Image: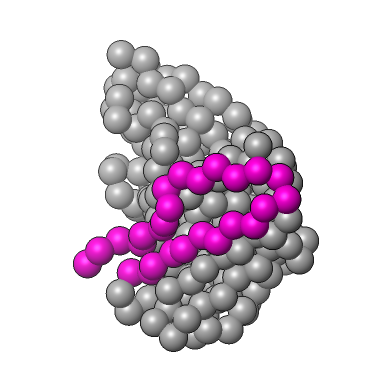
Amino acid sequence: AQSVTQPDIHITVSEGASLELRCNYSYGATPYLFWYVQSPGQGLQLLLKYFSGDTLVQGIKGFEAEFKRSQSSFNLRKPSVHWSDAAEYFCAVGADNGQNFVFGPGTRLSVLP
Amino acid sequence: KAGVTQTPRYLIKTRGQQVTLSCSPISGHRSVSWYQQTPGQGLQFLFEYFSETQRNKGNFPGRFSGRQFSNSRSEMNVSTLELGDSALYLCASSSSGNPNEKLFFGSGTQLSVL
């Protein structure tokens, strides 16, 4: 069975600073990897996904993530954070049999003005 | 296109009661998944329906059940409610239910069990 860890529960950065959110997964085969963002009281929105090809993937809102098989990681990055990026971020891994995704515990991002 | 719609938005029930939550997927989407979100356990997969058939099920007791109708709308039922069932229940849909496919989430139903 697949699993996901996000080591950082809460991260605070200043507006304009760079950001990296960590995600480590466990899965026997090539994983399907996703990053979602959730604003308070809302559902989740997909930022980006990886399942094959180029290991550096670009997403919406200026986010990117890099798949590193050797480290079982899929870290999310953004070069310059905006106040509107404050939200909770979830890394998720999917299996081969449909859409029973496993989500990480989430990282809450706070942005200082 | 309208997004994923979940009703009701908020629900308050007492222990022992049962509850039914509804989810209308994006038009044309055939896969509907349900997740439970709590501060302690995070997001946990409940089940997935595809073309009216339950295709996957998470590790939840039999009190949690669901179904999908021919128009892809889905309902989730929880019987004999317990305090620990208080959570945000999220529904998500996708076009064909492939594992590499994006999920579109609704805003959720916030269930409080008193």
Q: Which residues are magenta?
A: B1-26
If the image is split into quadrants, where does the C terminus of chain B sit?
top right
Picture residue at 34% right of the left edge, 32% below the top: A85
Q: How many marks?
A: 0
- Residue A32 seen: no
Q: Is B17 within the magenta?
A: yes
Q: Position of residue B94 (x, y in %)?
A: 42, 71
Between residues A70 and B111, which one lies in front from this camera angle?
Answer: B111
Q: Position of residue B5 (x, y in %)?
A: 36, 60
Q: Position of residue A12 (x, y in %)?
A: 47, 20
Q: Is residue A42 above or below residue B44?
A: above
Q: Nearer the viewer, residue A74 or B73?
A: B73
- Left of B80 or right of it: where is B93? left
Q: Is residue A69 magenta?
A: no
- For image coordinates 43% across by 74% down, the residue present is B73
Q: Quadrant of residue B1?
A: bottom left
Q: Residue at x 64, y 57 (%)?
A: B18
Q: Is residue A109 above or below residue A65?
A: above
Along the line of sight, which residue is nearer the eye, B2 or A24? B2
Instruction: Name the residue at the top extreme.
Output: A113
- Scheme of image coloration: one colour
Q: Residue at x 51, y 60 (%)?
A: B21
Q: Is residue B99 left or right of residue B8?
A: right
Percent of width and height locating residue A42:
40, 43
Relative to B9, residue B96 above or below: below
